[in-house]
Image: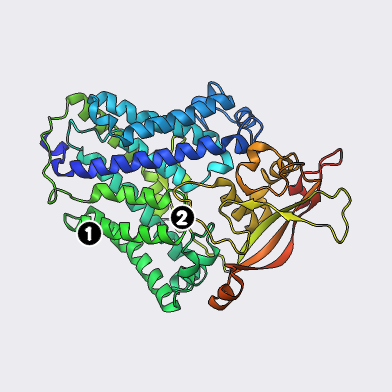
Amino acid sequence: MEWFTADGYWLSRLVFQRALAGIYLFAFLTAALQFRALIGERGMLPVPDFLRRTDWRSAPGLFRLHYSDRFFAAVSWTGCAIAVALLAGADSHLPLWAAMVLWALPWALYLSIVQVGQTWYGFGWESLLLETGFLAVFLGNAHTAPPVLVLWLLRWVLFRVEFGAGLIKIRGDECWRRLTCLYFHHETQPMPGPLSWFFHRLPKSVHRAEVAANHVTQLLVPVLLFTPQPVASAAAGLMIVTQLWLVFSGNFAWLNWLTITLALPAVDWSLFATPPAQSAPPLWYEIVVLAAFALVVFLSYRPARNLVSRRQVMNRSFDPLHLVNTYGAFGSISRVRLEVVVEGTDEEVLHDGTVWREYGFRGKPGDLRRMPRQFAPYHLRLDWLMWFAALSPVYARPWFGPFVERLLENDRDTLRLLRHNPFPGVPPAHVRARVYHYRYTSWRELRATGCWWHRTYVRDFMRPVSLGPSWISPTRRS
């Protein structure tokens, strides 16, 4: 079948595959370094408990066969090793079938992790990585030209990511329609980056232009992905520029980098490089790709219907393997930034003069003088969930109590998730949490005080608690 492959897209595939391998590396590294405190056997939401509550049909994966922290660590570090091999181009030195197996391995391993990740893995970019990783299995390697059908499916994923995000904004918060959402977003986003303070201080006219450009990029440009070249390449290029703007202005794990990666196969590089000699694809490969294409088209019905629905939902998987999903973000924008500040004291008896010392998180705002750091594409899962907890204690109900309990024990794995432990020797006697309103300082305040943030006490999130016979889950006291 002469139409089956597109020789000119060999470089697009190569760049896409190496970029995707890099994202896999960050995903597995995040899992390996954080899982014990979050979902390990002694974690805040233990995997064994989750497995007892669910069945194969709802969450299939390797850990249905066996779970231990050692096995989870082996899966995560194996995923890292495979990602490094793919990043180095190992698939190009293998037969076609072996290259497909090599790309299937990180997908299967990461699917198993997501299936037991619970709240900690409830982000849209988990499903996006799995959907993209599944399609990458069928892209082939240097021995054959890229299959046209898979290239179109990758554009279909990118279209849903961008168009879905655009629709949820237009249908959601009125500030998107009034072009005023970025008056607030750079300050109230889940995890600001080192440039977010400066983005927030841009003139309001620039913020309005940002929103207008976002609407064009997410609602009009995605349609151009399905037009002939060079228009499709230009559309992909605009999306890449927009995503880089988001990379510089915040920390959204690997969402922006994966969206950029998805745009790469839509670019026609044939004008810049001559394709190498490639053999005709074997019949079995054509059959496998056609079967995968048919499966994705069949599973696309519900996500496509969701796009046109007035009750559009964001970041939803419609099948247990996360093969075809729906995406979107920031349908509503917070006008003020609330932060949960966790504090402890070593005083056994509390009184009005009790000295409380603050725990420091790696990414979320805390210390007023600490400039936000850049962590993406690495994903600080606890810091992200703390942002949701500040919006409502409901988001923290399953895990905040166990988190505080581990702080009272000076649990080593939990403390590794933090930047600063004010009790390095003896655990605290009591822990409490309070909600503060954070805002960026002005230029004048920054010069005078050296503070990037100003905060005002709002309310208690959790009254002081301690370990002992009277221990009550803090989330019940919220």
Local packing at callout 2 (Cα closer than 10 Å; few below 14, some 14-19, many 20+) is: some
- Note whether 87 is above or below 172 in the view shown: above
Q: Is residue 181 visible?
A: no
Judging from the image, what secondary structure is the residue with disc 2 in?
loop
* Residue drawn at x 48%, y 28% as measured from the top left: 75
Q: Secondary structure at mark 1?
A: helix
Q: Which residue is mark 1?
A: 234
Question: In which image quadrant can residue 416 be found?
Answer: top right
Taking the spot 11% from the left edge, 44% from the top edge, the residue there is 274
* Vertical arrangement, residue 253 with respect to residue 192, above or below: above
Name the kind of residue labelled 2 in the image.
Gln
Q: CA distance from mark 1 to mark 2?
A: 28 Å
Point out the residue furthest to the top here: 65
The disc placed on residue 10 is none
**Residue that label 2 marks:** 312
Q: Residue at left 27%, top 30%?
A: 91
At x 53%, y 44%, the residue is: 122
Query: Which comes before the other along the chain, label 1 or label 2?
Result: 1
- Where 73 sits versus 229, above or below? above
Closest to the observer, 36 or 395: 36
Tell me if 340 is positioned left or right of 213 in this view.
Answer: right
Q: Is residue 220 visible in the rendered structure shown here?
A: yes
